[in-house]
Image (tube, rainbow, N blue to C red):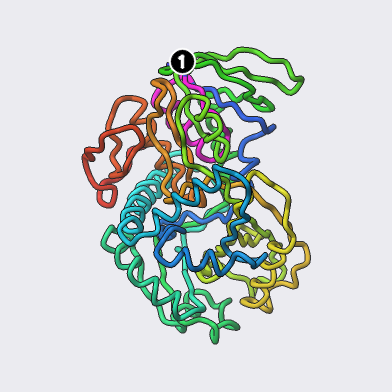
Amino acid sequence: MHITVLGAGVTGVTSAWFLRQAGHEVTVIDRQPAAGLETSFANGGQVSVSHAEPWANPSAPFKVLKWLAREDAPLLFRLRPDLNQWLWGLGFLRECTPARTRHNIRQMVNLGLYSRQVLQQLRAQTGIQYDQKTAGILHFYTSQAEFDAAQGPAQQMRELGCELDMKTPDECVAIEPALRDSRHRIVGGSMTPSDESGDARLFTRNLANLCEDAGVRFLYNTRIVGARATSQRLEALQLADIDGVVRDWRSDSYVMCLGSFSAQWTRLLGQTLRIYPAKGYSVTLPVTHPEASFQVSLTDDEHKLVFSRLGERLRIAGTAEFDGYNTELNLVRCQAIVKRVRELFPQMTDGEGAQFWTGLRPATPSNVPYIGRSKCSNVFLNTGHGTLGWTHGCGSAAALTDIVEGRQPEVDFAFTGMDRAPRRSAAVQPATVG
């Protein structure tokens, strides 16, 4: 079967890999000149099963209101005359109940455990390199209230099979000595030794190369400018190349991996996906003081920042700004990240050489992605991963390949457009690659 994957970010390229390994003819279409140049370009770098508590939780409404007037807020809604934003916001509020939060944590932990297994097997199978580190992730808390609130979700994650151990401030510093100058700020932490980190862009680029070696075709510098569809089927796409020449493109099936833009295209196909862009920011710093620089991947839960060591680079990323499809870099938010880094690691950097980046992350109100069948019989969904596209990318692609081939995926997850009857638990069953 000829399958066209729309989008060459981490979810699109992993989808192409697993579909090709299953024997399908695969073409990937992307408007950029290479793979991994949008949301996957400079994200936080964490493969973090433990990052499973959704933004929408019982404490979120109060925090959002408190942060409305703060330009540097971790979660900032810029209210717009945009119906989609308001409908997304209402959906977000519906997900803030304790019951919905527990349900969504379960979805993300199950998918995360499965996806990490698939990534590890892919790495063993191919030898792919991407500045990966397998030293775990340390979550640290500088607010007692935040630390206390984390105990319930942490217990649920442990029950679901996520290895997560609570730590004292001294134990946090023992795990990551670079935190020693912030020992007085830390009230506690948690360690997930099986979590990982790595450069998502480098992974995506190198996997795209492996895909090409395996026979996958990439159409870069190519925009989707139109579609012809019936109520049941996508008949053709209209593609424009770099010179603006438009042509029809037909395929047996299509996989939607267009990130924040997926909602716009599926609406033309008669389906509403509640996806809204959450603008995230990152700062990449050179390692100038190795003895004061962190080695273990970290999460600052109070400020919603993640820290990853990518070779001789330090990547700090986080925050979410809901401001439509605006991709302008807000220096106030970038400088707030640098300020927090210098507070926590005063001897590590003076901020010189900082590279700022912003990208649109495809957020759903629940933080749970759409993976599965669309209302069009030949269109499949692999989108809406929010901040966890790198964490969930490999597992989402492997599960989607099962769905395309008419099999039930191995992971217990609420797949879109399917009646779920899971065969086995992802927490105990190893993933199948290829």
Outermost residue on the bottom side: it is 184
- Could you tell me if residue 161 is visible in this image? yes
Q: 87 or 352, which lies in front? A: 87
The quarter of the picture where the N terminus appears is top left
Q: Tell me residue 4's x, y (percent).
A: 51, 23
- Residue found at x 42% / y 28%: 380
Residue 7 on the magenta span = yes
The picture quadrant where one finds residue 219 is top right
Above or below, 180 against 133 in this view is below
Q: Position of residue 264 (x, y in %)?
A: 56, 33
* The residue stretch that appears in magenta: 3-25
Name the quarter where the C terminus is drawn.
top left
Q: Which residue is drawn at the image coordinates 48% and 73% (left, top)?
A: 140
Mark 1: few/some/many CA within 10 Å (<14, 14-19, 20+): few
Residue 415 colored magenta?
no
Say what amino acid the circle numbered 1 marks: Thr
Left/right of residue 43 with respect to residue 403 in the rendered view: right
Q: Residue at x 58, y 70 (%)?
A: 294
x and y percentages locating residue 72 in the rendered image: 65, 66
396 up-or-down from 334: above or below: above
Q: Residue at x 61, y 54 (%)?
A: 79
Residue 397 appears left or right of 45: left
| Residue beneath disc 1 | 230
Please determine whether, in this image, residue 172 is positioned above or below residue 77.
Answer: below
Task: Determine whether 429 is above or below 344 in the image.
Answer: above
Residue closer to the observer: 245 or 80: 80
Q: Is residue 215 visible?
A: no
Secondary element under disc 1, as helix, strand or loop, is loop
Q: Nearer the viewer, residue 357 or 89?
A: 89
